[in-house]
Image (cartoon, grey):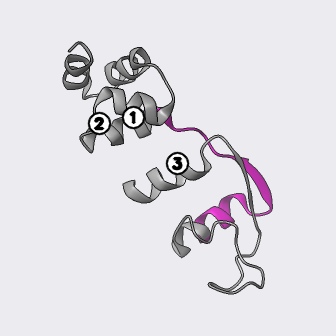
Amino acid sequence: MAEPSLVSFLEQCGGTKLYVPKTLGLERTTVRSCPLEALVSWTHKKSLRENFGGRTVSVPMGKNYLAECYRKAGLESREIAQKLRISIRRVRDLAAASSGADSLSHEVSK
């Protein structure tokens, strides 16, 4: 998934269980509509169906990934912490685990 699509998917579904139907049905119809309709592209739904069709999957929170994406988008540590509902210390820890640790750690210490 492309970064903006994955961020949106994790923001909406992270930490939940999601049923992936065996068949996707037709786009933009109420007949056999896919619960993923508004979340991911047809190509991604097809891939999800092929790998997980007929099963309920647990969607990870993806906080490490989201924190890095938010940092790249220019959000401040406080904003990241509030958005992810984690402490600023946790934001610092996530930053230290990523390649961009220096800039985020410096910002947190301000």
Q: Is residue 57 covered in magenta?
A: yes
Tell me if 97 is positioned left or right of 29 in this view: left
* Side of 2 where 51 appears, left or right: right
Determine the secondary structure under disc 1: helix
Q: Say whether residue 70 is left or right of residue 37.
A: left
Q: Residue at x 77, y 70 (%)?
A: 22
Q: Quadrant of residue 66?
A: top left
- Would you place residue 51 above or below residue 86 in this image? below
Q: In this picture, which residue range is highlighted in magenta?
A: 46-63
Name the element at disc 3.
helix
Amino acid marked by disc 3: Glu
Q: Residues within 10 Å of mark 3 (few under 14, many from 20)?
A: some
Question: In whole angstroms, how far apart are the C-alphas of marks 3 and 2?
Answer: 15 Å
Q: Which residue is identified by label 3?
A: 11
Q: Which residue sits at x=52%, y=48%? A: 11
Q: Earlier in the sequence, mark 3 or mark 1?
A: 3
Left or right: where does residue 71 sit relative to residue 14? left
What amino acid does circle 2 point to?
Answer: Arg
Q: Is residue 82 above or below residue 4?
A: above
Q: Using the rendered view, name the quadrant where residue 39 is placed.
A: bottom right
Residue at 70% x, 72% y is: 34
Q: Position of residue 33 (x, y in %)?
A: 72, 77
Quadrant holding the N terminus: bottom left
Residue sitting nearer the eye, 48 or 29: 29
Residue placed under numbered mark 1 in the picture? 67
Residue visible at 57% across and 52% down in the picture: 12
What's the CA distance linking mark 2 and mark 1? 6 Å
Residue assigned mark 2: 71
